[in-house]
Image (cartoon, helix red, strand yellow):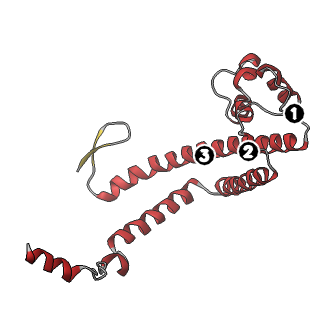
Amino acid sequence: MHLLDANNQLMKYDTPEQILEDFYHIRLELYKQRRSARIRELKIALLLLENTAKYIGKVCKGEILMFPLKENDERCAELKEKGFQSSQSIAWMVHPVGRKVTKKEELRTGYDYLLSTPVESFSYEKMKGLEQERDEKNNEFRELTNASPKSLWLKDLDALIRQLDAEKYPSAEKRAPAKRAPDAAGPQRANKKSCM
C-alpha cells in the first residue's frame, strides 16, 4: 500500500499496523493540542461566568446602579474600578498571543459581555444558575487537567465503538416495524371507493 504520510511524502506500507503506528504519534500530538485548547477555552469561560455572576449580584444588591444612564466609557471605567475584567484582558491573561489590547479599546468594547446582560437576568435565580454553570465547567476543567491526551483518545474511541455497535446491532424496538393502529374508517373507505 502506498499512502501520503504527515509530511505529504509518499510512503510504502506493508501492513495496516504500520499505517496505524505512523498515525498514532500524529494523532496523539493532535490530542495534546486539543486538550490545551479546551483548557484555555474553559479558563476563559470560567472567568467570564465568575465576572457575570459577580456583576449580576452587585446590581441586585444596588452596588452598581443601572440608572441614571451613563456614557459607555464611564460605565466601563466604573466596572474596571470595581474589579471587573474585560473580555480582552481575560483572553490575554489565559493565552497571551498577538498584540495586547489598548486601554481605549478595552474601555470601548471589553465590557460588552456585562453591559449587554438582559434586564430579566438581574435576579438571584439567574445568579445561582450562573454559579451552577460555573461549577459544572469547573468540574469539567478539573477532569480535563487530570486526564492525559491518551486517556482522552481512548474515551473517544470507546464512544465511537458504542456508536458503531448501536448502528450495527439496533435494539429490538428499532428493528421491529411499527404496527399501525386499525383505521376506524378503513372498511367504510373501501365501500366508498367501490361505489364510485
**Above or below 182: residue 15:** above
- Most foreground residue, 3 or 31: 31
Q: Could you tell which of marks 2 and 1 lies nearer the N-terminus?
A: 1
Between disc 3 and disc 2, the foreground one is 2
Q: Quadrant of residue 59?
A: top right
Residue drawn 71% across the image and 32% down it: 87
- Residue at (30%, 58%) from the top-left corner? 16
CA–CA distance in space, label 2 to label 1: 15 Å
Which element is circle 3 on?
helix
Q: Amino acid at mark 3?
A: Arg
What is the three-letter code of the residue carrying label 1?
Leu
Tell me the number on the disc at residue 51.
none
Instruction: Please say if 105 is above or below 116.
Output: above
Q: Earlier in the sequence, mark 3 or mark 2?
A: 3
Q: Who is closer to the viewer here, 52 or 126? A: 126
Instruction: List x then y, in percent, for residue 93.
Output: 73, 33
Name the residue tied to disc 3: 38
Disc 1: which residue: 65
Q: Is residue 45 depicted above or below 108 in this figure? A: below
Q: What label sits on residue 120 in the rendered view?
A: 2
The answer to whether the residues at label 2 and label 1 have Cβ atoms under 8 Å apart is no
Tell whether 101 sits left or right of 186: right
Give the distance between the C-alpha atoms of the residues marked 3 and 1, in whole angstroms.
36 Å
